[in-house]
Image: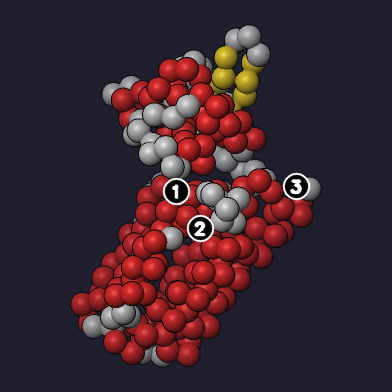
């Protein structure tokens, strides 16, 4: 199957950010291979279902992340399948939302969700959390798979809170979580640190310790914020 057939049309409301995210995923997963020349901008825009200006902006974003190189008059080429550079511009998500906005919202929702879950979680829900952790720890899974499991874990904890409004609010920012996660997953040690944080959260929730669950969530989010700050200081 060609990479063109793997492209999912992007709703216009997401525009360049969503296109860049999906293009990065196609490159990282090998649908567009290193050394390969991308289709012309016009064709890419048609395939993604966006305007050429949005496609052009998305290509610039992916190039800034180190995955593409533009040879003027020749075309755009894939030069890497590993995004190792996080730029200040990556702190903008979609619309008017920033990564710090997302952290503040996640802290409010996930800390309370974990606290409630520790009081209400069932044995079946505990088993599900452990199963997700086990899959996330499996060697050889891709960053895309890890991010998917990361999201599943947080949503499962939210569901265990028994508060449907909290669940719905958490789901309402899930698309921002996905965009952000794909941008930071390549930071050195990020997956290992994230998984260790998840383990501590699950241990506290499964053990019925609301106070420990709140602390584990706060520490988990603080650690990734620190990783981002250290990286940005290094590249500036």
Q: Earlier in the sequence, mark 1 or mark 3?
A: 1
Q: Residues within 10 Å of mark 1 (few under 14, many from 20)?
A: some
x and y percentages locating residue 62 in the rendered image: 57, 34
Q: Kindly indicate the quadrant of the structure image that contains residue 146.
A: bottom left
Answer yes or no: is residue 185 visible.
Answer: no
Say whether marks 1 and 2 touch (CB < 8 Å). Answer: yes
Residue 223 to residue 121: above or below: above
In the foreground, 219 or 139: 219
Please give the residue where the numbered disc 3 appears in the rendered image: 235
Identify the element where label 3 is drawn.
Answer: helix
x and y percentages locating residue 20 in the rendered image: 51, 37
Which residue shows up at 51% across the image and 24% down it? 52
Q: Which mark is residue 191?
A: 2
Q: Kindly indicate the quadrant of the structure image that contains residue 228.
A: bottom right
Residue furthest left as drawn: 124
In the foreground, 82 or 139: 82
The colour style of the image is secondary structure
Which residue shows up at 39% across the image and 61% down it? 172
Question: Is 208 situated left or right of 73 in this image?
Answer: left
x and y percentages locating residue 157 in the rendered image: 35, 74
Residue 98 to residue 115: above or below: above
Question: Is 230 situated left or right of 151 in this image?
Answer: right
Q: Earlier in the sequence, mark 2 or mark 3?
A: 2
State which quarter of the image contains the N terminus: top left
Please give the residue where the numbered disc 1 appears in the rendered image: 143
Question: Is 118 situated left or right of 20 in this image?
Answer: left
Mark 1–mark 2 Cα distance, whole angstroms, equals: 8 Å
Nearer the viewer's eye, disc 1 or disc 3?
3
Which residue shows up at 62% across the image and 52% down it? 91
Residue 74 to residue 45: above or below: above
Which residue shows up at 42% across the image and 89% down it? 210
Identify the element where label 2 is drawn.
Answer: helix
């Amino acid at each position: 199957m060609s990479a063109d057939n793997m492209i999912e049309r992007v709703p216009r409301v997401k525009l360049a950010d969503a296109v860049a995210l999906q293009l990065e995923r196609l490159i990282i997963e090998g649908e567009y291979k290193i050394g390969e020349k991308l289709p012309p901008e016009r064709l890419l825009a048609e395939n993604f279902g966006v305007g050429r200006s949005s496609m052009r902006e998305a290509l610039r974003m992916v190039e800034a992340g180190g995955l593409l190189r533009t040879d003027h008059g020749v075309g755009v080429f894939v030069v890497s399948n590993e995004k190792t550079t996080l730029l200040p511009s990556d702190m903008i998500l979609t619309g008017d939302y920033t990564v710090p906005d997302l952290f503040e919202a996640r802290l409010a929702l996930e800390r309370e969700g974990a606290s409630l879950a520790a009081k209400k979680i069932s044995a079946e829900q505990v088993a599900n959390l452990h199963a997700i952790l086990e899959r996330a720890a499996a060697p050889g899974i891709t960053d895309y798979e890890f991010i998917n499991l990361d999201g599943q874990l947080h949503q499962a904890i939210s569901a265990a809170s028994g508060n449907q409004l909290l669940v719905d609010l958490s789901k309402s920012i899930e698309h921002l979580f996905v965009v952000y996660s794909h941008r930071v997953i390549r930071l050195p040690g990020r997956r290992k640190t994230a998984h260790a944080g998840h383990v501590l959260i699950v241990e506290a929730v499964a053990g019925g310790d609301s106070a420990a669950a709140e602390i584990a969530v706060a520490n988990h989010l603080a650690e990734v914020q620190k990783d981002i700050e250290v990286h940005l200081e290094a590249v500036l």
